[in-house]
């Protein structure tokens, strides 16, 4: 196949999202089949330093734009930059990370370039001279092999589905600055402010995730302080349970997750939700505590490398997905695990 592979490097405040380097790893696997090599494009404030790092991860050409219109992420000028780079470089394949920004830009770029898009891809391979992408469908119950006849082919790749190459400090280069023709009047999206939603290790980047479900609230031995009605007491117990899970996650250097049922019940904020309507994750280790394992939840975590389930119900669906299952009370098992890992990792 002729043409380049163009990789969009998603970055914020001079720090690249790890999934972006994973895309260069995916591109390097395919590089022999594309004659034009690997190019990367970076946008936003302090993007030049990220652009320089892209050479060290294996990009042959790197383009960046630090125009003031790109200081805050807004889809219109960012899409304009990606589309401009695509029209000038004429890549046969464009790769985006499946981040919030990456999904949005991939879809908008596909519209402007009049091409197709294959989202949430977990595997790429060449078969009979054609690029074949594998992606989960039907809430992750099946894997579909798809291809795109239009050019450029546009793909968003799931975080942690591909391996990032090792940084090579001997590789260097000078990124090329490109300009966009976008006035503030043409940008409909305006950023009015930010609020902190997620602290600690990001779910999308975590190697280890400890998640809790409705079962985390089932500890009648905990007596809530003060006067509370039944619902308030339930939420209080669940919050103590999630604090217990968070302690295990911290010991393992991981992140805290939750099922939709736990979020809907008010136990924990939405930003922790894993599932079809939450975050889709692929950690090395996923520990599901008090989670029954509904299809909606499985859609967000079934590609985890190893799944461990802890549940009182031996017939819980999560056990069919888990590599290891423990039938028992999370309030007995999780503290024991935390203490054991703390000693082992000390």
Image (spheres, rainbow, N blue to C red):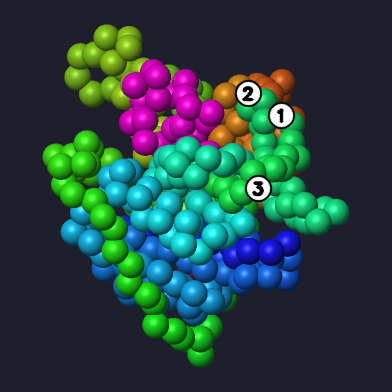
In the picture, the disc for residue 295 is 2
Residue under the point 19% across and 19% down: 226
Residue 259 image point, x, y percent: 49, 28
In the picture, the disc for residue 307 is none
Residue under the point 57% across and 47% down: 154
> Where is residue 196, by image quadrant?
top left
Q: Secondary structure at mark 2?
A: helix
Q: Is residue 81 left or right of residue 304?
A: left
Q: Secondary structure at mark 1?
A: loop
Q: Earlier in the sequence, mark 3 or mark 2?
A: 3
Q: Give me the C-alpha separation between circle 3 and circle 2.
A: 19 Å
User: How many labels were placed on the picture?
Assistant: 3
Q: Is residue 169 magenta?
A: no
Tell me whether the residue at label 1 lies in contact with that at label 3, contact meaning CB atoms closer than 8 angstroms: no
Q: Is residue 313 left or right of residue 79?
A: right
> Residues in magenta?
256-282
Q: Is residue 240 left or right of residue 20?
A: left
> Where is residue 308, by image quadrant?
top right
Q: Give me the C-alpha separation between circle 1 and circle 3.
A: 14 Å
Tell me whether the residue at label 1 lies in contact with that at label 2, contact meaning CB atoms closer than 8 angstroms: yes
Can you see residue 248? no
Q: Nearer the viewer, residue 337 or 209?
A: 209
Residue under the point 21% across and 54% down: 69
Judged from this view, the residue extending furthest toward the bottom is 170
Which residue has dot 1 on it?
A: 141
In the picture, the disc for residue 122 is 3
Judged from this view, the residue extending furthest toward the right is 128
Q: Earlier in the sequence, mark 1 or mark 2?
A: 1
Q: Give me the C-alpha separation between circle 1 and circle 2.
A: 8 Å
Can you see residue 36? yes
Q: Nearer the viewer, residue 344 or 167?
A: 167
């Amino acid at each position: 196949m002729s043409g380049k592979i163009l990789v969009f490097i998603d970055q914020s405040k001079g720090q690249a999202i790890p999934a972006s380097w994973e895309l260069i790893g995916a591109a390097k696997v395919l590089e022999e089949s594309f004659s034009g090599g690997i190019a990367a494009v970076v946008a936003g404030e302090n993007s030049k330093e990220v652009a320089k790092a892209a050479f060290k991860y294996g990009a042959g050409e790197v383009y960046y734009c630090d125009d003031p219109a790109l200081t805050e992420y807004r889809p219109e000028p960012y899409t304009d930059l990606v589309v401009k780079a695509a029209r000038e470089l004429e890549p046969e394949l464009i790769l985006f990370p499946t981040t919030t920004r990456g999904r949005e830009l991939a879809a908008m770029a596909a519209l402007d370039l009049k091409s197709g898009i294959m989202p949430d891809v977990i595997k790429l391979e060449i078969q009979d001279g054609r690029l074949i992408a594998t992606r989960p469908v039907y809430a992750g119950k099946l894997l579909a092999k798809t291809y795109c006849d239009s050019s450029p082919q546009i793909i968003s790749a799931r975080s942690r589905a591909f391996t990032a190459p090792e940084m090579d400090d001997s590789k260097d280069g000078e990124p090329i600055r490109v300009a966009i023709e976008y006035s503030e009047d043409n940008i409909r999206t305006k950023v009015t402010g930010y609020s902190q939603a997620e602290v600690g290790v990001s779910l999308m980047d975590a190697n280890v995730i400890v998640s809790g479900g409705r079962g985390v609230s089932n500890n009648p031995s905990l007596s809530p302080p003060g006067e509370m009605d039944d619902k308030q007491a339930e939420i209080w117990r669940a919050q103590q349970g999630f604090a217990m899970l968070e302690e295990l996650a911290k010991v393992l250097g991981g992140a805290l997750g939750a099922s939709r049922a736990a979020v809907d019940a008010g136990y924990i904020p939405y930003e922790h939700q894993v599932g079809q309507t939450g975050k889709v994750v692929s950690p090395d280790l996923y520990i599901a505590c008090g989670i029954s394992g509904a299809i909606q939840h499985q859609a967000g975590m079934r590609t985890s490398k190893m799944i461990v389930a802890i549940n009182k119900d031996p017939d819980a669906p999560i056990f069919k997905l888990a590599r290891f299952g423990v039938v028992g009370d999370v309030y007995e098992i999780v503290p024991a695990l935390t203490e054991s890992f703390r000693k082992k990792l000390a």
